[in-house]
Image (spheres, grey):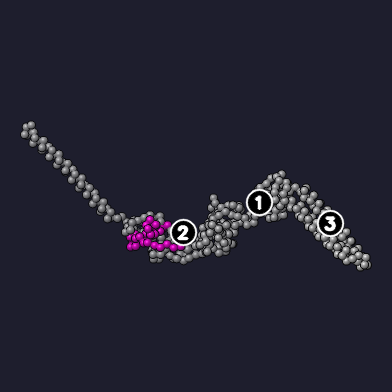
Amino acid sequence: MKPWLKWLISLMILALLAAGGLRVWNARKAQKIALDTQTAAQKIQAVVALADSDVVKVQNLDMAQSLPVSGPLKAVTSAFIKARVAGELQDLSVREGDFVKAGQVIARIDATEFKARVRQAQQQAESAKAQVDIAKRSFDNNRSLVDQGFISKTALESSSSSLAAAEANYRAAQAGAELAVKSLDDTVLRSPIAGQIAQRLAQPGERVAVDTRLVEVVDLSRLELEASLSAAESLAVKTGQVASLTMEGSTQTVSARVVRVNPNTVAGSRAVLVYLAVEASVPLRQGMFVQGKLRTGSTRTLALPISAVRTDKPQPYVQAINQNLVVHLPVVLGLRGEASGQTLVSVQGVPENTLVLSGSTGSLAAGTPVTLTPTK
């Protein structure tokens, strides 16, 4: 190879290396400029404009204390009508939804056998009565003979014992007759209360045993909510306290009042049952599920809407405004309650009248400058 060609190739290689180095240097310079620009932008923070609705004030408020309650409605008065004697069911014509009066005949049990038993018991009682008459006449005769000295007193004592036995048999026969009459009366089934038929559990023509459930009657004029509370929650509940309830699937509100508190806890769950009488002007049904809040009292304390308290750090905190800057202040949470339709929580660690960002504002970094823009 000629010398001048070697020099030409060397110069070309050096030129390529110089061009590559220049490109790398330009890229690093551009990266440094971009980084410096980003750092400067981060140091210059934009001022966040806040409306009146974006801030809340820490205030001393009368916070209503309440407990959540829920459960199905139950009729205070209800009854299962059961068969009191065994036999064939007859004349059961009422069905679910029918109204019945107290004492109204609901059904009958075939009384043929029971009528025969009444006749049998009455005839046995008459026979026992005749034996009493015979024993009494014999006793009177023997007493006259003893007075005249014709028989001994032993015979009179024997007659007295026979009379006592006959009278006892007569009383037993009378009791048997009364039992037979009662069994006959038990073949007629009557409603013990006024109300509506909730369940019909048997059909005419069936042979039913003693204590077989036939129908259920409920009185819907008085309904109760049986609410289950923890033992600790139940300590704040007293008779007369008022609750506001809503029915499942409806926005209509009904009121209820605590009428009883069970003195015992439920075995296993250790819950306490509280009974609330429902006061409603609209028709309700047994078994309807209702839920609501039972007001147990009120407390005056420093409070905030619970949505203004943030929990994305190990300790709860609020985003307060101090000299137009956002500061994160840790707080200690206390009781929860309601005021003006809002769910509130009592807080410690922030002074009264401190402005705090509401929950709808979102998270802002500490030190962010803000300005309040009054809503026109």
Q: Amino acid at mark 1?
A: Glu
User: Residue at image x 69%, y 55%?
Assistant: 192
Q: Give me the disc on residue 343.
A: 2
Please state the horizontal and vertical placement of residue 236, each as a whole percent of the image: 52, 64
- The amino acid at mark 3 is Ala
Residue 128 got which mark?
A: 3
Q: Tag 2's secondary structure?
A: strand
User: Secondary structure beneath disc 1?
Assistant: strand
Q: Kindly report which numbered mark, 1 or 3, lies closer to the viewer in this rendering.
A: 3
The residue shown at (68%, 55%) is 193
Which quadrant: the N terminus? top left
According to the picture, the residue beneath numbered tag 1 turns out to be 216
Instruction: Tell me if mark 3 has few (under 14), some (14-19) or many (20+) residues whose alpha carbon lies within 10 angstroms of its own.
Output: many
Asked whether 210 or 340 is in front, the reply is 210
Tell me which segment is drawn in magenta.
307-336
- Choose top left, top right, bottom left or bottom right for residue 311: bottom left
Query: Mark 1 or mark 3: which comes first in sequence?
Result: 3
Q: Secondary structure at mark 3?
A: helix
Question: Which residue of the protein is positioned furthest toward the left in this rendering?
Answer: 3
Residue closer to the observer: 94 or 252: 94
* Residue 356 part of the magenta-drawn span: no
